[in-house]
Image (tube, grey):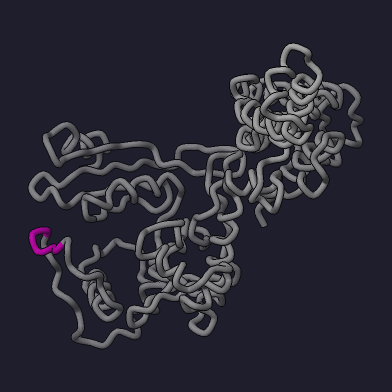
């Protein structure tokens, strides 16, 4: 079937255990997403544990993959990017080059950060089959012969089936030396891969912790690049990027503006509690109406301080009932974007032809009042402050045809805006590192 709508219709709404879907494939850049062919999948109408996934690519034509139905939605979602081939635990090829497994999700642009593989080279079917001994071709299976619950193919069986595929190809197919089947790269060399103990050391955790994450399916541990004798091995860049993902979390943003290395309350809570503490303390210790109520039971200033501290902590913890934080976060974001828009009009009005010819990224300004409110929000509600920071960067970069700036310039803009607030330079630096991805290398 050629029509993706027809492929979807084979399984969609056909009963329990069947489904189908079709969408345009998407190609992503740092600033935009656009259609790039289409894709469709359907549950096999006779064997519901299998699914067919069909992709039409504008450059490489049409491909059909038979997979376990349980894996269909995951693979289908991955095809939103222009990945055509996966190898070595998630390294992927898009027709022009090889890229590392997608791990770092850029919240600003709502897409994964892509990092190319230095020194990567494709391995063709012809080069692989040259190492294949004659007479070792596997039988071609029918759909009925496929065992969904079977063990994954080992390297030897995979080579046999590759040879079977080569024999069955149509005469007008691409030459075998143009058919990509694998990748080589310095970082994937056997002597460069990390054992589980070494990978745990890179991540700064115990080997037992990493082993537990893997067995329980926690913390998004990347797939190993090689498994030999049941022992997984990872490339160093993949593990380094996994460590990097663990820094880009809401919890890390909260820690960056918290006391006692992230173990204590965030700095805004402490400021608010201190203010309320002195208000209550003054009221309890000086009010002629309230003081007699405590004088018989608590007779010293220390007792008043303890009561005041308890009450002030309760009030500070109820900040969200005092201040509409969600609405404040949206208001601060809109104010920041308004400041950038006004800066854009100013630089457009006074920009010289020479500046335009040099095509320099523009610097923008956030007003002192807006910066003060952003500082307050980060200190008192770092989770929502984090959302404002990365959403601001993403919204500006998506309009980069207008604003002509860079991520680094926007991070600098945020640092300047926060420089007059109560956060220290170290807290600002640490917070922004946990909230906004750096520029791609």
Q: Is residue 209 magenta?
A: no
Where 317 sits versus 62, above or below?
above
Residue found 46% across the figure and 71% down from its top: 183
The kind of secondary structure the magenta stretch mainly shows is: helix
Where 166 sits versus 350, above or below?
below
Q: Nearer the viewer, residue 377 or 286?
A: 286
Residue found 66% across the figure and 21% down from its top: 328
Residue found 35% across the figure and 65% down from its top: 215
Instruction: Please identify the quarter of the rendering in which residue 90 is found.
Output: bottom left
Q: Position of residue 249 (x, y in %)?
A: 57, 47
The reply to whether residue 380 is visible in this rendering is no
Where 292 sits versus 26, above or below?
above
Q: Nearer the viewer, residue 94 or 326?
A: 326
Asked whether, in this view, residue 223 is left or right of residue 121, the answer is left
Q: Nearer the viewer, residue 272 or 190?
A: 272
Residue furthest out toward the front: 296
Instruction: Please identify the quarter of the rendering in which residue 244 is found.
Output: bottom right
The number of numbered discs placed on residues in the rendered structure image is 0
Query: Where, quadrant-wise, is the C terminus in this rendering?
Result: bottom right
Q: Position of residue 305 (x, y in %)?
A: 74, 33
Instruction: Please identify the quarter of the rendering in which residue 131 is found.
Output: bottom left
Q: Position of residue 270 (x, y in %)?
A: 72, 37
Q: Is residue 146 magenta?
A: yes
Q: Which residues are magenta?
A: 143-147
Q: Position of residue 120 (x, y in %)?
A: 54, 70
Where 186 sits versus 242, above or below?
below
Query: Where, quadrant-wise, is the N terminus in this rendering?
Result: top left
Asked whether, in this view, residue 90 is left or right of residue 163, the answer is right
Residue found 38% across the figure and 69% down from its top: 181
The reply to whether residue 428 is visible in this rendering is yes
Q: Nearer the viewer, residue 287 or 197?
A: 287
């Amino acid at each position: 079937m050629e029509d993706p709508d027809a492929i979807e219709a084979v399984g969609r709404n056909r009963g329990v255990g069947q489904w189908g879907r079709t969408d345009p494939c998407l190609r992503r850049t740092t600033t935009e997403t656009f259609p790039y062919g289409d894709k469709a999948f359907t549950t096999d109408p006779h064997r519901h544990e299998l699914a067919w996934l069909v992709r039409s690519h504008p450059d490489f034509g049409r491909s059909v993959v038979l997979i376990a139905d349980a894996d269909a939605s995951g693979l289908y979602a991955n095809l939103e990017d222009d990945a055509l081939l996966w190898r070595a635990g998630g390294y992927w090829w898009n027709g022009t080059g090889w890229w590392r497994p997608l791990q770092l999700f850029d919240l600003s642009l709502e897409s994964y950060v892509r990092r190319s593989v230095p020194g990567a080279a494709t391995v063709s079917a012809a080069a692989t089959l040259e190492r294949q001994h004659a007479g070792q071709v596997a039988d071609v299976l029918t759909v009925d012969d496929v065992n969904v619950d079977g063990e994954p193919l080992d390297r030897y069986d995979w080579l046999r089936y590759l040879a079977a595929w080569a024999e069955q190809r149509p005469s007008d197919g691409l030459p075998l030396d143009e058919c990509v089947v694998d990748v080589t790269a310095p970082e994937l060399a056997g002597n460069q891969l990390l054992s589980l103990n070494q990978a745990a050391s890179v991540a700064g955790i115990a080997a037992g912790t990493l082993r537990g994450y893997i067995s329980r399916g926690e913390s998004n541990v990347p797939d190993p690049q090689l498994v030999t004798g049941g022992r997984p091995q990872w490339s160093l860049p993949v593990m380094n990027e996994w460590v990097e993902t663990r820094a880009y979390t809401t919890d890390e943003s909260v820690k960056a503006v918290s006391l006692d290395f992230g173990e204590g309350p965030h700095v805004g809570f402490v400021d608010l509690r201190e203010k309320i503490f002195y208000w209550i303390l003054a009221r309890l210790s000086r009010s002629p109406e309230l003081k007699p109520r405590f004088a018989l039971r608590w007779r010293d200033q220390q007792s008043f301080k303890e009561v005041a501290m308890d009450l002030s902590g309760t009030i500070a913890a109820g900040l969200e009932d005092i201040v509409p934080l969600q609405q404040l976060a949206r208001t601060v974001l809109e104010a920041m974007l308004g400041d950038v828009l006004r800066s854009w009009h100013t630089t457009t009005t006074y920009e010289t032809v020479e500046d335009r010819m040099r095509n320099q990224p523009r610097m923008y300004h956030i007003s002192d009042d807006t910066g003060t409110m952003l500082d307050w929000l980060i200190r008192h509600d770092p989770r929502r402050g984090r959302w404002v920071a990365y959403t601001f960067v993403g919204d500006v970069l998506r309009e980069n045809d207008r604003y002509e700036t860079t991520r680094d310039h926007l991070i600098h803009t945020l640092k300047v805006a926060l420089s007059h607030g109560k956060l220290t330079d170290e807290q600002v630096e640490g917070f922004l590192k946990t909230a906004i991805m750096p520029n791609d290398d």
